[in-house]
Amino acid sequence: MKHKKNHIARTKGELSYEIFSTILCVLIIVLSLYPIYYILICSLSNPFAVQSGEVMFTIKGFTLESFKAACKTPGLWRAYGNTIFYTVFGVVFNMFFTATMAYALSKKRLIARKFFTLLVAFTLWFQAGMIPLYLTLRNYNMLDKRITILLAFAINAYNLIILRSFFEQLPDSLEEAAFIDGASNIRIFWSIYLPLSKPALVTVGTFYAVSRWNNYFWAMNILTDDKKLPLQVMLKKLLVDRVAGAEEAAIVTASSATSPDTIIYAIIILAVIPMLVAYPYLQRYFKSGATLGAVKG
Amino acid sequence: MKSATVAARSAAAKNKPAGGTERPLNKASFRSRFIKDWDLYLLLLPGLIWFILFAYVPMGGLAIAFQDYNPWKGMSGSEWVGLQNFIEFISDDVFLRTIKNTLMLSLFNILFCFPAPIILAILLTEMKNKTLSKITQTVTFVPYFISLVVVCGMVISFLSPSTGLVNVILRNLGFEEHYFMVDPDAFRPIYTLMMMWRETGFNAIVYIAALMGIDRQLYEAAKVDGASKWQQIRYVTIPGLMPTIVIMFILHIGKLVKVSYEAVLLLYQPATYQTADVIGTYVYRTGLLQQDFGLATAAGLFESLIALILVVISNRISKKVSDSALW
């Protein structure tokens, strides 16, 4: 870095601020990434080295045994598949219910528009809560069914309002022209508004996808059948409740090169890989979404 | 895009002769308005039904807060007991504990988690080195995409008694090992740090966007007046950011009593209930685990009502002190 003395912006104060902020940034980067990095190097190291605390900055005694054992955790892949199912079809349900209603609410000519909007907005500030929702689902006979996960969480009021605001700011002239050509509302929605709203739809869809992927609480309470459980509930059992899964896997591999700890680290890595792979994409849409919501909220 | 512009053009061409067919907005009766746009209401319908079935019917279910609810008899068969559930909740020792813990976790949150993204945003936008700024922003955003379950699993692993990272470091430095997860005094710092690690990068985005909107000329003017970097931040950046901070703070106040029970549920243990048990986890335990639905619903309703009141009040206040308000 060249220090240009005669340049007005480069005052002494600015330089010291620059040094201070650089140090702070590096520190923040390390703090943000180190936990994930540590787990990665542990999962690839010899468990004895991990236990004795030798693994801090680099892999010691490289081995893939922990990953092999993690892959054999009973039910892990089924749970993985379930999560993909819930995420993909969940987002389809989300987008259908959210976009249709958001579009209808964006039209000023809708009768009782204010009332319907209030009906949506009110749920932002007041919800029935855990127990009434649970009992309602039970009354509907919807417990322990896959469809419940898809349907009961089909709309997030916040996302709906984001989409409505987006539809609202598209010019009315788009629609007027098509009406004169004799197009129906549904047709205009489908072939004019949706294609024009791609950025907003993708943003909201991404919001939904991440929350679908990460949801554990309701899946844990609604689903009792192990075969239907998503990855997060499975992970809760393995990582938080520490049920025997990891130990079982250790026994299955019957190898001295694994320990429950390193297997758990390997499972964590397997669980976060999809998110990290999708990260550059997710980041872009979450950024645009966060500002979208804040402005229009 | 193309079809839309074509359509718009054809509209411009047809508009004059077809003026009579323009949608009459004010004079038409409800009936004719409805018939003309019947399929718009068809689009409204799925969402409307969803809100009725999954948001408002459960709200009706809140009535069991006033019942000695018996799941076999249902809502119509159960006995009405007035405020008895609320009295039972409030007179229970657990009540004060959950209220205190809820407020303490919120206080920790406001003291540490709320300012962190503001500071990060200012730090990143005021830097000259844009590459490092971009990298830092990207990196701090990563933890947000790691699920709560995994983050809590990581915390539990790191803090585990003998083999966890933190205890390994303590041991190497010559300190005694400590089992943090069963230490009531450690719960609040653990929870707060975890939330800070996970959410600061994400929460900073809103502030960064707001900072981008500040007129650069203000900085130039401040520099001409001889303002130091610190003074620029103090007198230009922070005032420019204030409306956003106020809005975010209002949103925060509304959540004061709504601590993320999903995270607490993953981290707490019976040994740490005295500092960790919040209203949400109490509702979960009494309702879904012990099946005392009436009591749990009453506790949940209590929490929701206070949250609602807080949102209304804080919004009123913010309307008075500034122009920014949520509605």
Image (cartoon, coloured by chain):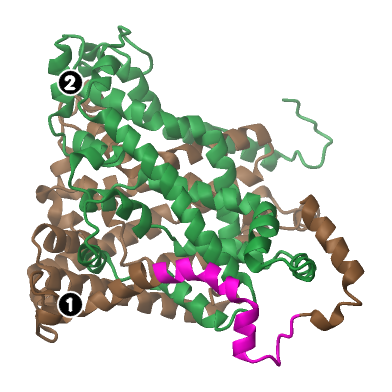
In magenta stretch: residue B27: yes
Q: Position of residue A231 (x, y in %)?
A: 30, 37
Residue at (74%, 40%) from the top-left corner? Answer: A11
Residue at (87%, 62%) from the top-left corner? Answer: B9
Instruction: Using residue B62 as the reference point, say whether residue A12 is left or right of it.
Output: right
| Up/down of A218 relative to A62, above or below | below
Q: Which residues lie in the magenta part?
A: B23-50
Helix, strand or loop at mark 1: helix
Residue type of the residue flagged with mark 1: Ile
Chain hosting mark 1:
B
Can the viewer see residue B243 in this picture?
Answer: no
Determine which quarter of the picture holds residue B158: top left
**How many residues crowd around disc 1 within 10 Å: few (fewer than 14), some, or many (20 or more)?**
many
Instruction: Using residue B250 as the reference point, say whether residue B264 is left or right of it.
Output: left
Residue with the mark numbered 2: A249
In magenta stretch: residue B161: no
Residue at (14%, 11%) from the top-left corner? Answer: A254
The residue nearer to you, when weighing A287 against B195, is: A287
Q: Do labels 2 and 1 touch, CB within 8 Å?
A: no
Q: Where is residue B117 in the image (x, y as percent from the top left)?
A: 50, 50
| Up/down of B324 relative to B174, above or below | below
Q: Distance between the residues labelled 2 and 1?
A: 45 Å
Q: Position of residue A119 (x, y in %)?
A: 45, 76
State which quarter of the image contains the N terminus of chain A: top right
